Image (tube, grey):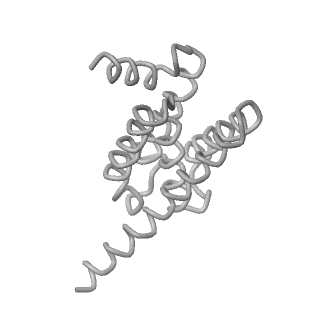
């Protein structure tokens, strides 16, 4: 049990890195804001983001336990992919600012971390975008039925 607890603690805290905790948890908060703050989120784009966040968080924690990974960057990457798919990057100033923050996060980690990190971030963003498209398709079928 101690190994699991240690893996969870190290994974959630980026092995104790305050800098990475601040960056990544701020990006998670901004990603949630993209889906919940009316000035940043179009009403028709909010659906489906909570189940996505739960699924990707479970995946993230699984990686902490199995691969000794650290952090929550898959969560914010997926949320940003979901939000971007909903608008194609268009929107109000707050929305554009929050999307820009996510893009800066991707660039920062692409430059400062190994390429596998960038691949993971991009795959999570694609998962978020795909989730949005799939959710919209399901919602569309429900409305037309």
Residue at point 47% right, 48% down? 79
Residue 46, given in percent of the width and then of the height, sits at: 38, 55
Residue lying furthest bottom = 145
Residue occupying the far left of the picture: 145
- Residue 131 position, x and y percent, is 43, 62
- Answer with the quarter of the image where residue 138 lies: bottom left
Q: Nearer the viewer, residue 113 or 42?
A: 113
In what quadrant of the picture does the N terminus appear?
top left
Q: In the drawing, does residue 17 fall left or right of residue 65?
A: right
Could you say where residue 144 lies in the image, as x and y percent from the top left? 27, 85
Taking 88 as reference, is 19 above or below it? above
Q: How many marks?
A: 0
On the picture, is 97 further left or further right than 135? right
Please give the name of the residue rendered at 56% of the width and 15% of the height, measured from the top-left corner. Answer: 17
Residue 116 % position (x, y): 66, 43
Residue at 40 percent across and 44 percent down: it is: 59
Q: Quarter holding the C terminus?
A: bottom left
The relative height of residue 50 versus residue 66 in the rendered view (above or below) is below
Instruction: Name the residue nearer the viewer: 69 or 83.
Output: 69
20 lies above or below 94: above
- Residue at image coords 55%, 47%: 95
């Amino acid at each position: 049990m101690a190994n699991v607890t240690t893996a969870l603690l190290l994974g959630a805290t980026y092995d104790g890195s305050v800098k990475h905790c601040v960056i990544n948890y701020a990006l998670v908060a901004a990603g949630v804001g993209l889906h919940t703050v009316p000035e940043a989120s179009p009403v028709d784009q909010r659906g489906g983001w909570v189940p996505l966040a739960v699924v990707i968080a479970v995946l993230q924690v699984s990686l902490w336990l199995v691969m000794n990974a650290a952090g929550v960057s898959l969560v914010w990457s997926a949320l940003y992919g979901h939000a971007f798919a909903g608008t194609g990057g268009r929107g109000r100033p707050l929305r554009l600012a929050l999307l820009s923050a996510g893009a800066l996060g991707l660039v920062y980690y692409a430059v400062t971390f190994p390429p596998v990190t960038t691949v993971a971030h991009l795959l999570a963003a694609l998962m978020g975008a795909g989730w949005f498209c799939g959710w919209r398709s399901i919602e569309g079928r429900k409305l037309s039925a």
